[in-house]
Image (cartoon, helix red, strand yellow):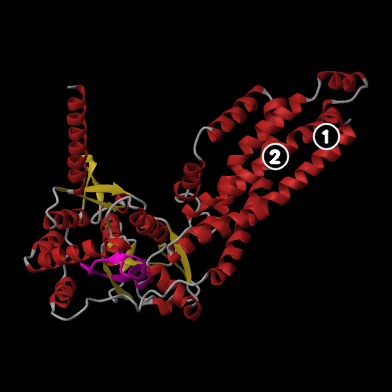
């Protein structure tokens, strides 16, 4: 009886597992980036736990065409969609994924379902002087990194003298255009029109979209290479959605339908034809050797920024520590408040405040804003290191100095500071190494340092192994010599003090 019950229990468990697995397979799990915003994918204002957008509806139409019970959204950073789909985080990647030869070579890519145009946006006062890329020699042009637009700017950089500026999102390029940090923005017409409507809603027409398209491209869905059979089924669903008008209805609801979409549908549905592949816009990725000069330049930016920021942190930190130890009560309150405020808030927030928040008062260049943010942030930590080191000097030595008639300034210079420097050397070195790594955050304000350049490299080659290894080697090459020097100084000074 017990054996029979156990057997029945096992059968039930197996059946339950199969049902669960079957139920999960009936849901189409797809990934996208809600940070991209409408009309692609955005959090629903009425229910932020859900998403809406034309790619959300496209995913639902695909799920229905595949007889899946539902389409479930998974949030992922836009630049990581390809790698996440190969990892199996989700089955289908949407969210304005661009059709490129590189993507088709590495993944299973659906037929194109939407055609976009790369358009230039310029400030209103420049619309008569700037008609295209040829009028932007020596000018800064912003765009979203790891896109067809960015690849296009890089391909014409030498011939046109344009300075491409890469962003991690598609909102701040237009903000910087209005603020005068950029001379133009090159992005998809959907993104440009959304940004224009956003500024127009505030009664501001600070920039215009030039009518001539620089290039065109298509949005596709991306699946893991092993899912080519499922890709073919999705292609059939998309063709049917084009025939029955449901895809057109989705685009019209989101106000993105135009004649070019109808022409794309005709090309896709025409027997014996293959819809547009964007081979004229994106080239194949270069090898590791070709990226070395870019990585070297980015490493130089990282090292220069770190050295200058640490120098600023040391100077300001000394002032803060001195004010906190020797200043009058109001100064001690101010310095303590600054230290606690800076240490209690994220460095990333401070970067945004200095670069974007102060733009209405002073428009700092990106490198200078990064230097100030890193330097002023680490100054708070340095101040605490110096304060602790100064207070670690034995009090009998200070009393002996006063007995000998030395002033407080002389005691600080001759007795306290030299010993405090030995105490502070190790944590100062650790802080510099930490600052060297934290400099990777400045890419959010368009400074292309080592980690950002590595991310661009990894996105282009579709793999993080080689780029990540090269990046780690460069960081170690910069930080290990400093650590060894600090240990030598500690041993040398420690021997002298004994």
- In the image, residue 58 sits, relative to residue 276, either above or below, namely above
Q: Quadrant of residue 395?
A: top right
Q: Quadrant of residue 215?
A: bottom left
Do tag 2 and tag 1 residues touch (Cβ < 8 Å)?
no
Mark 2 or mark 1, earlier in chain: 1
Q: In the image, residue 115 lies at what x, y percent? A: 23, 70
Horizontal side of residue 198 vs 496, given as left or right: left
Residue at x 80% of width, y 33% of height: 417
Residue mark closest to the camera, 2 vs 1: 2
Horizontal side of residue 403 vs 346, given as left or right: right
Residue 419 colored in magenta in the image? no
* Residue nearest the observer in this picture, 438 or 286: 286
Q: Which residue is mark 1?
A: 418
Distance from disc 2 to disc 1, alpha carbons, whole Å, reads 15 Å
Residue 104 colored in magenta in the image? yes
- Asked whether residue 181 is in view, the answer is no
- In the image, residue 73 sits, relative to residue 381, either above or below, namely below
Horizontal side of residue 205 vs 459, given as left or right: left
Q: Which residue is mark 2?
A: 428
Badge number at residue 91: none
Look at the image and give the residue range highlighted in magenta.
97-125
Query: What element does badge 1 sit on?
Result: helix
Query: What element does badge 2 sit on?
Result: helix
Q: In the image, residue 171 lies at what x, y percent? A: 36, 55
Q: In the image, residue 1 lies at what x, y percent? A: 17, 22
Q: In the image, residue 317 lies at what x, y percent? A: 67, 37
Q: Quadrant of the C terminus?
A: top right
């Amino acid at each position: 009886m017990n054996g029979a019950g156990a057997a029945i229990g096992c059968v039930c468990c197996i059946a339950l597992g199969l049902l669960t697995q079957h139920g999960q397979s009936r849901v189409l799990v797809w990934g996208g980036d809600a940070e991209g915003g409408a009309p692609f994918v955005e959090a629903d204002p009425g229910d932020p736990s859900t998403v809406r957008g034309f790619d959300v509806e496209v995913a639902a139409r695909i799920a229905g065409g595949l007889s899946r019970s539902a389409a479930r959204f998974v949030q992922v950073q836009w630049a990581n969609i390809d790698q996440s789909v190969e990892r199996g985080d989700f089955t289908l990647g949407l969210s304005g994924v661009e059709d490129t030869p590189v993507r088709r070579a590495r993944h299973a890519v659906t037929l194109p379902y939407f055609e976009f145009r790369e358009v230039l946006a310029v400030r209103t006062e420049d619309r008569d002087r700037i008609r295209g890329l040829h009028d932007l020699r020596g000018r800064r042009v912003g765009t979203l990194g790891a896109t067809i637009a960015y690849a296009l700017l890089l391909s014409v950089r030498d011939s046109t003298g344009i300075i491409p500026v890469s962003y991690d999102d598609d909102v701040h390029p237009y903000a910087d255009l209005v603020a005068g940090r950029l001379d133009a923005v090159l992005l998809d017409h959907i993104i440009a029109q959304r940004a224009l409507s956003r500024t127009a809603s505030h009664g501001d027409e600070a920039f215009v979209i030039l009518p001539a398209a620089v290039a065109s491209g298509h949005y596709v869905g991306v699946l893991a290479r092993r899912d080519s059979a499922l890709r073919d089924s999705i292609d059939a669903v998309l063709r049917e959605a084009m025939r029955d008008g449901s895809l057109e209805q989705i685009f019209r609801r989101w106000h993105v339908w135009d004649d070019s979409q109808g022409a794309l549908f005709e090309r896709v549905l025409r027997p014996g034809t293959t819809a547009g592949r964007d081979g004229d816009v994106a080239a194949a990725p270069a090898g590791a050797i070709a990226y070395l000069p870019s990585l070297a330049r980015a490493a130089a930016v990282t090292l220069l920024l770190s050295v200058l920021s640490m120098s600023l942190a040391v100077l300001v930190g000394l002032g803060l520590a001195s004010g906190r130890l020797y200043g009058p009560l109001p100064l001690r309150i101010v310095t303590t408040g600054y230290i606690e405020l800076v240490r209690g808030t994220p460095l990333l927030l401070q970067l945004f405040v200095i670069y974007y928040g102060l733009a209405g008062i002073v428009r700092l260049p990106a490198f200078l804003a990064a230097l100030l943010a890193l330097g002023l942030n680490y100054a708070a930590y340095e101040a605490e290191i110096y304060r602790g080191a100064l207070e670690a000097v034995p009090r009998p030595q200070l009393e002996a100095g006063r007995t000998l008639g030395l002033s407080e300034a002389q005691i600080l210079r001759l007795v306290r500071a030299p010993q405090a420097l030995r105490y502070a050397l190790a944590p100062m070195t650790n802080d510099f190494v930490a600052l060297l790594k934290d400099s990777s955050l400045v890419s959010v304000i368009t400074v292309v340092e080592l980690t950002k350049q590595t991310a661009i490299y990894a996105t282009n080659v579709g793999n993080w192994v080689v780029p990540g290894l090269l990046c780690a080697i460069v960081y170690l090459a910069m930080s290990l010599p400093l650590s060894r020097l600090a240990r030598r100084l500690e041993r040398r000074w420690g021997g002298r003090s004994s």
